[in-house]
Amino acid sequence: MKTQVVPAPIPDPGASGPAAFEALSAAERLARPGLRGLLALQAVRTVLRLGFAATAAMAAGRLVMGETVEPRLVAGMIALLAAACLAGFAAESMQASAENVVATRLRALAGERLGKMPARQLQSLSTGALIVSMQRHPESIAALVVGHRAATAMMAAGPLLAAIALCFVSWQAALLVICLTPVMILFFALVGNAIRRRADAQERAFGRLAGQFADRVRTLPTILANHATASEEAKLGRRLEGYAGETIGLLRIAFANAGIIDFFASLSIAILAILLGLGHLKLATIPGFSNLELWQSLFILMIAPEYFAPFRRFSEQYHAKAEGLAAAAALNRLLGAEPIASTTLPVLDRLRLTLPAHGLVAIVGPSGSGKSTLLRRLAGLEPGAMPTPGTRPLAAEEIAWVSTDAYVPEGTLAEAMSWNGGALDRSRLENAARAIGLLDDALLPGGLDARLDKGGANLSGGQRLRIAVARAQLSGRTVLADEPTAKLDRATAEAVRRMLIGISGARLVVVATHDRDLAAAADLVVDLTRDDTVEVAA
Amino acid sequence: MSTAFQSSSRKSWRLATGFAFTALACAILLGGVSAWLLGSVAIAGLSAAAFTFNFHTPAAFIRLFAVGRTAARYGERLTGHKAALADQVSRRVELFAAMAAAPAVRRAGWQLGNDSRLADYLDDVEDLDFARLRAGLPALTLACGLAVLIAGSAVLAPLSLLPIIVLLLAILFAGNRVARAGAMAWRETRSLRRGGASRLGAAMASAVPLKAEGAWNRECTEALAALSRAGAAQLALRRLQAMLDMIGGALGPVAGVSVMAAAWYAGRQGTELLAPMLLAFSWLALGETMNGASRMLVAVLRRNAARAEIGQWTRGTAAGRREFALDDIKPALLLHGGLQRRAPDGRSIGTPISLLLARGQPTLLVGASGSGKTSLLKQIAGWIGDDAFATDDRILSAGERRALVSLVLHDAVVLEDTVRANLFAGDAPDAVLWRALEAVEMDGRIREAGGLDSWVRQDRFSLGEAQRINLARAWLSSPPVALLDEPTEHLDEAQGERILERLLVRFSDRIVVVSTHRAPPLRDVRTIELQP
């Protein structure tokens, strides 16, 4: 065996438990540079909008009062408007690209994590859940750490800037809107609590109904096979109605949140307009609201809604927060799962054998006796002792793995056969494909140019396995084959056996198999029988 | 679907539209009238008119508008969602029925059984459900608000129409461009996302070989990169949106400024400028609602994409779908002289075979993986192809056979529901259900889980347990033909044989076909060996 080098500590992919995956803090780190620029732009936009409001109020007020309006003022107003719009555009684009950067990097981090995960653990993950997670969760988390965080920060900065602008005209008006804020926040807290209580109650009572439509679509063929379409349709209607009714109940409270902001924004306009009006009529003398110019009143009127706008934007982000937190939790769960302890197989730890440089080695034994585990140990996919003391697992570049779950890329049969091996000339491909019966397969018409779907979706396990065997023959690597002849018809199984035996003339071929014929042709048989004795017969 | 619910949806939409108009009108008037009031009192305050000025009526109106805006917005949100949810219920039930009737369900490998495809599908359904609420209703009110204010501008300051119309045209032009480019970006996003998902799925399915050969990192990274490219395509869409919002956001202020400028240019002064000022502040208030314009556009283009996608699932559904009720037919045999076997995609497999399936003598289909056992069972069941089979006295079409056959799928799943509902036995008495669970050796497990009325999900069961629940359904089924696809898969050999034997005894008066890749030792069976 080529790898009998200096004895070295055996690498143990599952031994050192990986640190928990912290999606949220990683995303926050990634978001930091973008967030700073985004906040600056949003603040600039707010200042420019306030500037436009000030100049517009000044121009309108002076015009109505018959005073002269300087062209400089008008020009400034238009410039401020244009700049505010541009700053708005810049802020929006920056937020979008910052979120994209965070999502992409976070996904790459998750990919690295998957790369380090041992095969056994990877197999234990639900493929569907993993795909959904990789597709959506980084984006949801990015929206939380960029969009939602920016909205949170602006909830402090926006009203502050608006209040400062008000102070230029009337500090009393600023005080009035500031005084309304704690009242509003009190209402917020009350409503927020009510929503949470109600949502919890709903979750308990109706959580089961939430996914019913999705579940019935998922299970549609089963429903059809059991002639239950009509009854399930009726039941689905009832359950969706029940769920819709409950949802409305929850929304009734949830919308109160936005209603409160609307109420205070409207209320502030109404109060200010009336106080300012009284001041202008000189019917009452209210400090800060009397003896103002018209433009000053108009300015106050225009700024007041700006004061409340950031609260509104924040409340619209409510979903982003809930979704982002859920996504981060899901991603942490998925990537931070404890490594799965491999089953202890004392028979493998006692096993001593020296693998030849070439020849066919068959590992036999009943299901569960450790045949596949031994193969994986040889490939370095499983922790545990190597059968030859002092050796290391094979390097990935030396292995051709043969099994029914072999990887098949999208493309032609020729591309699938030369995958991971480099360019090969067509005649060699053709010979290998013919020898293994891939060229005259009625279910795979088109010879070497036969079209293979993504992930080999149009291939049977047997076809995949034959592609892997042909690939192994062409690759010149050591072959590790897991049950290469199971589930094959007689003729195909015979072709696979022939090719594996052919390869073993020049290279090492290790097979884990139930197939007596294959074992009979082996140069070395490793029998992992249940009574913990290991027979190695030449 | 109850008609009461549908009429309540129509009522809710009417109500929501009413609220939406009220909310917009109050918002516009709140801004406009407040400004007008301040202007009036400022002018009145200069003279003795201050003492005769009727302050309280406009002040009362302002308070009314403030409260009205808040209340109407709340009403709009609530009734709008109520209407959309009512629509959602009826649309989803219809969609379920349409999909159940679509041929795609009966073919091989139900794609929506896959989590990520299902999640995409649900997004599409939701895009359809809420398009009216997110785009239709706000677009309607916005258009009406625009029309009113444009008419007002034409009366009070005709010259201001020039910049307003120019800007509106620019918005329409940009909107059109964004709609087209956005639809393309969205299409690209979807296809990249799906490509990345299937690539990641393929890598996951081959995790062990890929890790062994050191190719996992490359494949996984490329799949994730495709997902991130989808994110980049979506970023393009968001940039377009931001551009549209930039132009849209300028409309209110520009129109307001134009109205004031045009009125001044027309020579209006003092109190004559109050009405234009009301209009100008109304434009400012309307401009706030323009901010959501790009979201409406995106809702529309997502709806269009969703409609096209969902249409694909229900394509091929016969318009006048007929369910055959063939309760009285109990064929003693099913016969086909030269059945051309077909793969799920319609390709023919091998040479035609002759089939004689007789009651009381089970038929065993044996063949290696990929030899087309499942496809043949589905062909017999009438799920794929449109072959006609003969019985003793009549010809049975594919559609008629579907009603006569209980097909036990090898990839059947557990519904998220009670155990009872999962057995599909209608209102069969408990004792019968327990007898079925005993026959498939699941009674202990179900008792542990809490009995027949406990709520279960797929992930609570191992593959073998799910398979045994599926066999319990077969046990309880009544159709005269039973087709069992790999009934012993995921079961240990002895248990599989025990259960299969019990099922065959129970089905002794039915036509039975069992497919398997390992031939169990059964007496009295005819065996058909399939070659690929």
Image: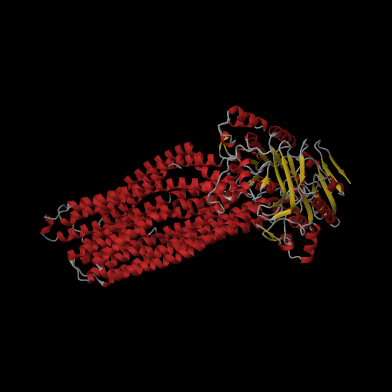
| Residue B448, position as x, y percentages in the image | 61, 30
* Image quarter of the N terminus of chain A: bottom right
Residue A416 or residue A119, whichever sits in front: A416
Residue B451 or residue A71, whichever sits in front: B451
| Residue A388, position as x, y percentages in the image | 81, 47
Residue A390 or residue A322, whichever sits in front: A322
Q: Is residue B31 above or below residue B440?
A: below
Q: Farthest residue in the top direction?
A: B431
User: Which quadrant would residue A396 be assigned to in this image?
Assistant: bottom right
**Left or right: where A148 falls relative to A396:** left
Q: Is residue A17 above or below residue B136?
A: above
User: Which quadrant would residue A57 be assigned to in this image?
Assistant: bottom left
Q: Is residue A112 visible?
A: yes
User: Which quadrant would residue A45 be assigned to in this image?
Assistant: bottom left
Q: Is residue A210 above or below residue B476?
A: below
| Residue B228, position as x, y percentages in the image | 56, 58
Q: Farthest residue in the left direction?
A: B48
Which residue is depicted at the point 38% across and 62% down?
A44
How many numbered discs sit on the rendered protein?
0
Q: Farthest residue in the right direction?
A: A538
